[in-house]
Image (cartoon, grey):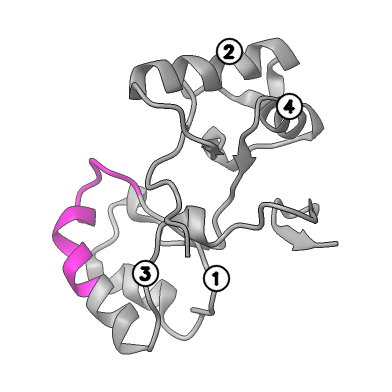
Amino acid sequence: MKQGKKYGSHSNTHPHVNKLSYEKNIEEIELSNDKIGKRTNLYRAPYGEYNNTVIQSAQDKGYFTIQWSLDTLDYKGLTGDEMWNRLNGKLKSGDIILMHNGTKHTADSLDMLIKNIKKEGYEIVPVGELIYKDNYKINSAGTQITK
């Protein structure tokens, strides 16, 4: 299996992309890649926003748009146990879990969360290994589905 990219773009300035033009959406993604220093092919728009313009601008430049399926709400200061309670019993194969760097308890909770996820029988892989790259469409929830 070919290894997927381990990083992706999340925009340059973290704007509300639904309010941007096609050209400005492309600029946000491309300037972010310039800062990363390597070209990625993954893009998750800020705030989970997307519309046809956001998706089309990303796709036209060769990016796969991604969303999350489970939110830890770590940005609200939840503890590791509270984050696990949000995931426990809801995990399924292919889930993408939203977490942020720089939040109060995320870093010190990662070890426990990863161990619990693995104990449930799941493998943690880069998001690039989870997404469809051919013959898919994006539904109204922002999820890739096969055609």
Tag 1 near tag 2, CB within 8 Å: no
Q: Name the residue under label 4.
A: 60
Q: What residue type is labelled 1?
A: Gly
Q: Distance between the residues labelled 4 and 1?
A: 25 Å
Where disc 2 sits, the SS reads helix
Q: Which amino acid does label 3 sit on?
A: Ile
> Farthest residue in the right direction?
147
Where disc 3 sits, the SS reads loop
Q: How far apart are marks 1 and 2 (CA)?
A: 30 Å
Of the numbered discs 3 and 2, the one sitting upstream in the chain is 2
Q: Mark 3 points at which residue?
A: 124
Residue drawn at point x = 45 percent, y = 38 percent: 8
Tag 4 near tag 1, CB within 8 Å: no
Of the numbered discs 1 and 3, the one sitting upstream in the chain is 1
Q: What residue type is labelled 4?
A: Asp
Of the numbered discs 4 and 2, the one sitting upstream in the chain is 2
Q: In which quarter of the image is residue 35?
A: top left
Front label number (4 vs 1): 4
Q: Which of 25 and 100 is in front in this view?
A: 25
Q: Distance between the residues labelled 4 and 3?
A: 29 Å
Residue drawn at point x = 73 percent, y = 55 percent: 141
Of the numbered discs 4 and 3, the one sitting upstream in the chain is 4
Instruction: Reply above or below: 48 against 131.
Output: above
Q: Distance between the residues labelled 3 and 2?
A: 31 Å
Of the numbered discs 4 and 1, the one sitting upstream in the chain is 4
Q: How far apart are marks 1 and 3 (CA)?
A: 10 Å
- Left or right, 43 with reference to 54: left
Quarter of the image containing the C terminus? bottom right
- Left or right, 116 with reference to 23: left
Q: Name the residue under label 1.
A: 94
Which mark, by number, is residue 27?
2
Residue drawn at point x = 13 percent, y = 59 percent: 108
